Image (cartoon, rainbow, N blue to C red):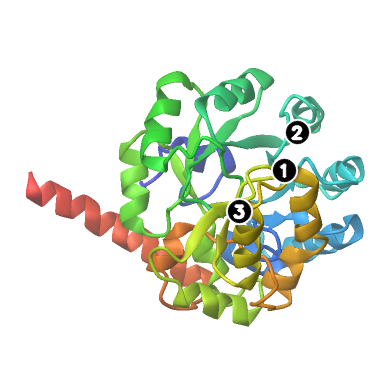
Amino acid sequence: MTLFAQNRITQLYNIEYPIIQGGMIWASGWRLASAVSNAGGLGLIGAGSMYPDVLREHIQKCKKATDKPFGVNVPMLYPNIEEIMNIIVEEGVKIVFTSAGNPKTWTPFLKENGIIVTHVVSSSKFALKSQEAGVHAVVAEGFEAGGHNGREETTTLTLIPTVKEKLEIPLIAAGGIGSGKAMLAAMVLGADGVQVGSRFVATEEASSHIEFKKKVVEAKEGSTKLMLKELAPVRLLKNKFYEDIEELYTKSPSVDELKTLLGRARAKRGMFEGDLVEGELEIGQVSALIHDIKPAATVVSDMILEFQESVNLIKNKF
């Protein structure tokens, strides 16, 4: 029997390890998703940065690159959502992670088409709403994360046990998790598995720009800050664009003024095209613990090895 044979997440998604790769914009294409799935985790294609035809291409390429389960992450605030959902059904995708919207909107449709639905939340309130909507599992993402952040600024250490108290369906922890030790800690707090974003940005297969990856590796404690709560809370690496936001905040800006500064395609400019000055550079606090760019399969194997070593270390301590 394997280490996680009885785990609710590995059973739900039919994977070897309860490690989910975050479906991050401009980083999570078919190469990364298939690499993580082939390594025993669950790879996710990030639909948020893809036009519908591009998403279809990535799904088709992922199906050719792996015979293991993989999924698609869909931020529901994006346009073309109906077309995107229809493509997912047409291409036979069996796992969908939804975020940035009401899970009641698409969960029934997806379930009717035999799809396992997981919703990303930042509070116990929305975790319960997701459970009521009929999702199969919930990702609870803490303040440390790069995206999908909550305005309440609840840390993962507090969020996971709070959600666990009230939830019956499987729970996945996210935010600040990039190692086997953090994975074990999250599972001790009540999570059935973990979702890892930032650590997979700094991998060879991530579609993010190499200069952005290098910037992530260079990050130190305090290099990021949660910003733009008035629009959609994201954690940014500090650069000129970040400084421009800080300066605008001193003038008590309106939402429209913040939108004007953000403009269009700012995240693409930074994370995909490598503009480290004017681009939006989203990454989690765990970037301070990322010191190299390596294959996604190595990230998975290193996490599992460290998880097992940490379990043994605790046993020996007590």
Q: Secondary structure at mark 2?
A: loop
Residue displayed at 63% across by 25% down: 130
Report if the CB atoms under discs 2 and 1 are less than 8 Å apart.
yes
Residue 210's place in the image compared with 284, above or below, is below
The residue pinned by badge 1 equals 94
- Of labels 3 and 1, the one closer to you: 3
| Kind of residue indicated by mark 2 | Gly
The residue pinned by badge 3 equals 250
The residue pinned by badge 2 equals 114
| Kind of residue indicated by mark 1 | Lys
Residue displayed at 56% across by 39% down: 150
**Closer to the camera in the image, 76 or 113:** 76
Query: Earlier along the polypeptide chain: callout 2 or callout 1?
Result: 1
Q: At which x and y percent is residue 143?
A: 48, 45
Residue 274's place in the image compared with 160, above or below, is below
Q: Secondary structure at mark 3?
A: loop
